[in-house]
């Protein structure tokens, strides 16, 4: 990676994080690929097994703060691979420690707005596999998206009929722990929905 590549990083990261991320990329010989939007994941990490470099991908459409958090998440996987290879769980204790250690470096630089800083400081105490599984942090990050999705499952009243992005129709049911039980109106089966799933309300 060349010094000029910082210009590219500035298109996706908060300015205060560019130097640190650039440093990590160079030190770890990372091939960073910015990809199209993937509905099933925000980013991923691939070890240098079938390629010469560590490879990290991050979705291009994330807001700068979500992009940064996703990058650090995947960088933690790299650090764990370097030390333990594949002998530990993907999001086990070793990954949580690595993620927390590197996120603390970012937090010290006051990169995040205060609401994200507060939510992130809480989440790294016992980080989850994905920021989307941490409801408070996910809600805060959504505030900074350029493209606003007006309606999410948690915004709907019980028994409201809605349509998902793939065209399936559901009726919202009661909340079960952290997710909502919703009835698929096409096959009469119940499905659990993350509260922040974007949907379209059907009148």
Image (cartoon, rainbow, N blue to C red):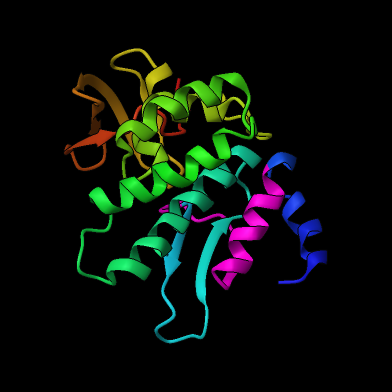
Left or right placement of residue 16 versus residue 4 in this view:
left
- In the displayed structure, 183 sits above or below 68; it is above
Q: Residue at x 62, y 30 (%)?
A: 112
Left or right placement of residue 123 versus residue 176 in this view:
right
Give the position of the C terminus as an image quadrant: top left
Percent x, y of residue 185: 26, 35
Percent x, y of residue 13: 68, 46
The answer to whether residue 8 is seen in the rendering is yes
Q: Residue at x 36, y 24 (%)?
A: 161
- Toward the viewer: 133 or 187? 133
Q: Residue at x 16, y 39 (%)?
A: 189
Tell me, yes or no, whether the highlighted magenta stretch contains residue 172: no
Percent x, y of residue 16: 71, 40
- In the displayed structure, 33 sits above or below 108; it is below
Left or right placement of residue 82 versus residue 69 in this view:
left
Left or right placement of residue 195 versus residue 111 in this view:
left
Tell me, yes or no, whether the highlighted magenta stretch contains residue 20: yes
- Toward the viewer: 116 or 139? 116
Q: Which picture quadrant has residue 113?
A: top right
Give the position of the N terminus as an image quadrant: bottom right
- Toward the viewer: 141 or 122? 122
Point out the residue furthest to the top here. Answer: 157
Q: Residue at x 53, y 52 (%)?
A: 71
Q: What is the span of residues highlighted in magenta in the rendered image? A: 17-41
Percent x, y of residue 125: 33, 31
| Total marks placed | 0
């Amino acid at each position: 990676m060349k010094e000029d590549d910082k210009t590219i990083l500035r298109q996706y990261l908060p300015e205060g994080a560019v130097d640190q991320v650039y440093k990590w990329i160079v030190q770890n010989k990372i091939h960073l690929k910015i990809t199209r939007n993937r509905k099933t994941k925000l980013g991923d990490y691939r070890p240098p097994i079938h390629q010469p470099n560590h490879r990290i991908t991050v979705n291009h459409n994330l807001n700068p703060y979500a992009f940064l958090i996703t990058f650090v998440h995947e960088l933690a996987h790299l650090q764990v691979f370097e030390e333990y290879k594949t002998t530990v769980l993907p999001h086990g204790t070793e990954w949580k420690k690595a993620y927390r250690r590197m996120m603390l470096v970012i937090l010290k630089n006051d990169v995040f707005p205060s609401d994200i800083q507060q939510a992130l400081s809480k989440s790294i105490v016992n980080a989850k596999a994905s920021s989307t599984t941490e409801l408070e942090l996910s809600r805060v990050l959504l505030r900074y998206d350029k493209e606003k999705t007006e309606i999410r499952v948690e915004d709907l009243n019980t028994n409201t009929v809605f349509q998902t992005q793939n065209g399936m129709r559901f009726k919202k049911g009661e909340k079960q722990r952290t997710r909502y039980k919703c009835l698929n109106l096409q096959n009469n089966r119940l499905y659990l929905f993350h509260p922040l799933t974007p949907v379209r309300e059907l009148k």
